Image: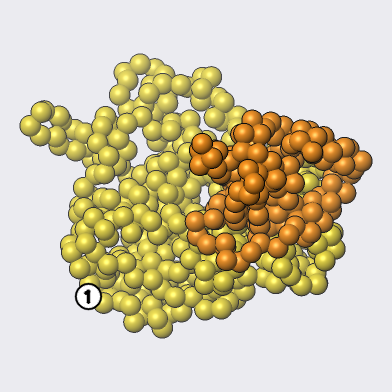
Amino acid sequence: MPLNIPNTREQFPILESVIYGKPLAYFDNAATTHKPRRVINKVDEVYKKLNSNIHRGVHYLSNQATIAYEEARNKVQLFINAAYSHEIIFTSGATGAINLLANSFGESYIKPGDEIIISAMEHHSNIVPWQMMCKRRKAILKVIPINEKGELILDEFEKLLSPKTKLVAVSYVSNALGTINPIAELTQKTHANGSLIMVDAAQAVQHIKVDVQALDLDFMVFSGHKLYGPTGTGVLYGKEQLLNEMEPWQGGGEMIKTVTFEETTYNELPFKFEAGTPNIAGCIGLGEAINFVSELGIENIQSYEDELLNYATEEFLKIPGLRIIGTADKKASVISFLVGNIHPFDMGTMLDKMGLAVRTGHHCAQPIMDFFSIPGTVRASFAVYNTKDEIDRLVQGINKVAQLFG
Amino acid sequence: MTIKEIQNEIVEEFRSFDEWMDKYAYLIELGNDLEPFDNQYRVEQNVLDGCQSKVWLHAWIKDGKVYYMGDSDAIIVKGIVALMIRALSGQSPQDIIDSDLSFIDQIGLKEHLSPTRSNGLVAMIKQMRLFAIAFKALQV
């Protein structure tokens, strides 16, 4: 297979693992990616050489830690092409970012009877926070339906838009199906309606260039750990004006300017939304993960992963009885599938014994499984370090399991 | 046979498998051979919902012995359900309450009884014991 990018495998220590006597082939990248040595070393280095609380110490280490933390914020800004670094709010992950937004946005903008639009392919993280907010604010949640290929039905989306629509919250890429949604078109239609859009890019930023200004996104969230960064890191991007207007969600240190028992005035962006001591080492590690991705080039990663996806799709379809769930025209490197009547748990358990790590179940997206009337799927998702040889092993493994159950 | 004797028998059976594949093939066989679950008991209150797979369990008492009927949508889980039913069904409530289920470790299937697997098996074993406790209480 032609490689546009250098082989990255040796940069990932965990890929040397041997599982049940077999070399690990890891296909659960949509759940979390592994971390290159440079990210691991960076986090290690923070604790060994830099550890201090940020933004509030006059001493040397605190200052150094603050500089490194804010550099990481600048890296995120460049990575998603935000206009200002203070539009980058560090969170615990995409879920943390959506919860922050649902609370702050809900508190600031949502009145009884207002409407929020999500889609039928959302992960629970982009459903439940909005349900909770709608319940609190007496707002209404609307859902864009999907077709049999696992694509959003855009005509139905347009019918849902109304003067009451305050926010459209959709994923860029479906974690369970791999569908890449037409975000530019959705954004344009949303804005034409006078509404705002939030894009859950948790499954996108590791595969696709996401330029928040080019797309004119109002809000965007992603997780660090799916982008080769540490767990417990994530980002909420928001346009400056919107973030300034919004009430903070969590109160505490760092997010305040002055506090008396009568009243508190809030700190400026981005600190207003970062109460308490953040995941300093994690965020600095995320900055290093962005260096890793940027040096390879996200376009190169995407074309390599597309090759893996196309190769795997072709080889999978040769397996008797295998059907792919999610056959959108535009897909990221995620394949959800079922073989005959074999339960995903059985398939996943057997593949695991062969050192093949896949995801099974409903992928925290139960409404999608209900739509396709299936209990769940087996999901293989590819990252930059996966190889064609590993896909061959996976195909052999699936065939072996199919024979055993056949 | 006592629960202990049945368990020893199962451990012996599994001892003959050198390859994990053979062990799982046997589990699949046990799952496929499990007595069909009576659909009248396939109701919400009999479901033990794991995140990954579902287990159905029904129990009754006859002549002082507890009997179980079980099922799962995943065959490997169903095979383990079959083993548990073989070990516990037809025993007295007290014997079931007192039973030591470490035979599952001995046959190398402990990983499937970890709460992190969320396949419904942990909940099933707990429920099997709860049935025994409830039947014992009814007997007094």
Q: Can residue B62 be seen in this view?
A: yes
Considering only vertical position in the picture, is B99 above or below B80? above
**Is B98 drawn above or below residue A12 in the view shown?**
above
Report whether B63 appears left or right of A75: right
Which residue shows up at 26% across the image and 44% down it? A249
Classify residue A241 by image quadrant: bottom left
The residue lying at 47 percent from left, 39 percent from top is A232
Q: In which quarter of the image is the N terminus of chain A?
A: bottom right
In the picture, residue B73 is in which quadrant? Answer: bottom right
Chain letter, disc 1 residue: A
Q: Please, is residue B139 above or below residue A345 in the view?
A: above
Instruction: Single out the residue that lies furthest toward the top.
Output: A59
SS for dot 1? loop
- Colour used to depict chain B in the structure image: orange
> Could you tell me if residue B84 is visible in this image?
no
Q: On the rendered structure, is A143 left or right of A377? A: left
The residue that disc 1 covers is: A163
Q: Which of A226 and B58 is in front in this view?
A: B58
The answer to whether residue A323 is left or right of residue A85 is right
Mark 1, Cα crowd under 10 Å, few <14 / some 14-19 / many 20+, is few
Colour of chain A as rendered: yellow
* Residue type, mark 1 in image: Pro
Quarter of the C terminus of chain A within the rendering: bottom right
The residue lying at 42 percent from left, 64 percent from top is A170
Give x and y (percent) for residue A65: 42, 26
Q: Is A115 rendered above or below residue A236?
A: below
Front residue (pair B33, A221) = B33
Residue A102 figure quarter: bottom left
The picture places residue A158, in percent across and down from the top left corner, at: 36, 80
